[in-house]
Image (spheres, grey):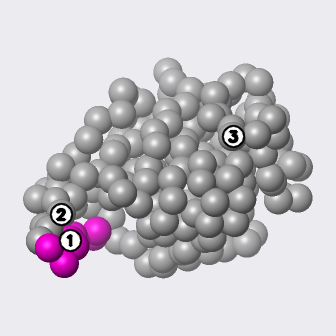
Amino acid sequence: MSKNPVKIIRTKRFGDDRGWFTETWNREKFAAAGIDTDFVQDNHSLSRLPGTLRGLHFQLPPFAQHKLVRCVRGRIFDVAVDVRKGSPTYGKWQGCTLSADSGEQLFVPVGFAHGFVTLEPDTEVVYKVSARYAPECDSGIRWDDPDVNVVWPLPFSSPTLSGKDTSLPRLKDFNSPFEYDGTPLEALSAAIVP
């Protein structure tokens, strides 16, 4: 496990009258900003309805994943929950809004559950992961676990969920294989990648 905190990533956009250009991933530059990860797979989701909630997900070892998440169309509220056994912030969460307009990304390290809710129609999310999808290691905790108490900015009274997400366990019923590595869950800070 690496000692990576949850971080908002801001990359420079170079614009002119045609639009803009940005590097969303550059191994050397991200490593210099403290994110030294080999990503092996890219995922892309489309959520047609606002209020579509995906999460809170993670993969178990040996296929645990770091994630680098960005919204390429629309807007999401993105969340990371500390599920590292022994962590002083076990069960605590952080969240931020990501949008296609802002171009910000969220780095979610191993040992954190991840989820998001869409805030606009036809929202698309792209994320890199550091391990391939392994269905036998697919896991998560409930999006509405009262012990975690994520404050989701739901545009409706209840979200649109998958069957899988309605049947995930609560955190108190999950025996975490993730150990606290000494990296605290701090207030979300931005890493500027030049």
Mark in the foreground, 2 or 3:
3
Above or below, comparing residue 108 to residue 148 in the picture: below
Residue 24, percent from left and from top: 28, 68
Determine the residue positioned at 46% across, 61% down.
71
Residue 166, percent from left and from top: 86, 49
Q: Is residue 32 magenta?
A: no
Residue 67 appears in view: no
Determine the residue positioned at 63% across, 28% down.
151
Amino acid at dot 3: Pro
How far separated are the C-alphas under marks 2 and 3? 30 Å
Above or below, comparing residue 102 to residue 133 in the picture: above
Q: Is residue 97 left or right of residue 166?
A: left
Residue 54, percent from left and from top: 69, 55
Amino acid at dot 1: Trp
Which residue is denoted by mark 1 in the rendering? 20
Q: In the rendered structure, which disc, 1 or 3, sits on the residue that comes first in sequence?
A: 1
- Find the magenta span and give its range: 17-25
Mark 1 surroundings: few (<14), some (14-19) or many (≥20) residues within 10 A: few
Q: Quadrant of residue 149?
A: top right
Q: Quadrant of residue 139?
A: bottom right
How far separated are the C-alphas under marks 1 and 2? 6 Å
- Give the total number of marks visible in the rendering: 3
Q: Which mark is residue 13?
A: 2
Above or below, comparing residue 137 to residue 180 in the picture: below
Amino acid at dot 2: Arg
Label 1 with label 2: CB-CB less than 8 Å: yes
Q: Which mark is residue 155?
A: 3
Q: Secondary structure at mark 1?
A: strand
Label 2 with label 3: CB-CB less than 8 Å: no
